[in-house]
Image: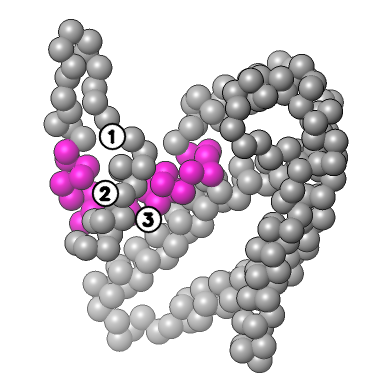
Amino acid sequence: NQSIINILLNAILLANVLGFEYFGRDHDEKDQLMMLPELDWFSRRGGTIFLFGPPGDPQYFKWEILFLALSIIIISPFLIFFTLDAMRNISKTNTKFLSGYTRAMARRLFITFIVQCLGAVVCYIVPLTFMLSFMLIDPHFVPGWLCACLRFLFVSCFQTLFNVNNYQFCLFFILKNPSYRKASFFTSLSNVTWFSGSYKKEISSGYTQARRMFHMFLVK
């Protein structure tokens, strides 16, 4: 039964990859849409532009969004069931014969799991849901002042957390480990270099930080 479930889930995930490849193409009226004033600056910028369609009408990509939603509906019950079943089995474990250190490690593992789940929800699931939802729903009904406040809140104030950037999301996995918190990478951030006459700190880019973190995770 488990093999059948795994085959089914992997087939659904593979179908989504193929769906993104097939339905991720431009709208038939891309040239006319690029002439709109809202998109004129895209044309002047140059480069390759993918235009799925106007807000609320992604001509081809909407079918992949719907299939992705259906896939999540199918896969989520299995993940929730297995997670709750594992938690129930752990809670039934007799702790009489376990040492205090083992119980503390089990509590730390459970807390880390919860934090990672919340990190995945905040940093990946929520912004991805908003992005895909507003591809199907025309957001023009939302007041302009509310859009401006939300953009400032989520982009400026919570840019580190509320973002689909996986380099930032991996901090949740690393900072929960005390060994990595004491690593030289985090202490090296205090040894910043000051530009002469500018009082600006030289901070590495997000890509460089992520590369160092993954190096610590794999090597150390």
The magenta region covers 161-188
- Quadrant containing the C terminus in the rendered view: bottom left
Q: Nearer the viewer, residue 90 or 134?
A: 134
Cβ–Cβ under 8 Å for marks 2 and 1: yes
Residue at horizontal 16 percent and vertical 25 percent from the top: 193
The residue under label 2 is 212
Number of other residues with Cα within 10 Å of mark 1, as a class: few under 14, some 14 to 19, many 20 or more? few
Number of other residues with Cα within 10 Å of mark 3, as a class: few under 14, some 14 to 19, many 20 or more? some
**Amino acid type of disc 3?**
Phe
Report helix, strand or loop for mark 2. helix
Q: In this picture, is 155 found above or below 44?
A: below
| Quadrant in the rendering for residue 17 | bottom right
Q: Position of residue 201 (x, y in %)?
A: 24, 22
Cβ–Cβ under 8 Å for marks 2 and 3: no
The residue under label 3 is 173
**Amino acid type of disc 1?**
Ser
| Quadrant in the rendering for residue 138 | top right
The residue under label 1 is 204
CA gap, disc 2 and disc 3? 14 Å
Cβ–Cβ under 8 Å for marks 3 and 1: no
Q: Nearer the viewer, residue 205 or 96?
A: 205
Q: Which mark is residue 190?
A: none
Question: Mark 2 or 3 closer to N-term?
Answer: 3
Give the dominant element type of the magenta stretch: helix, strand or loop: helix
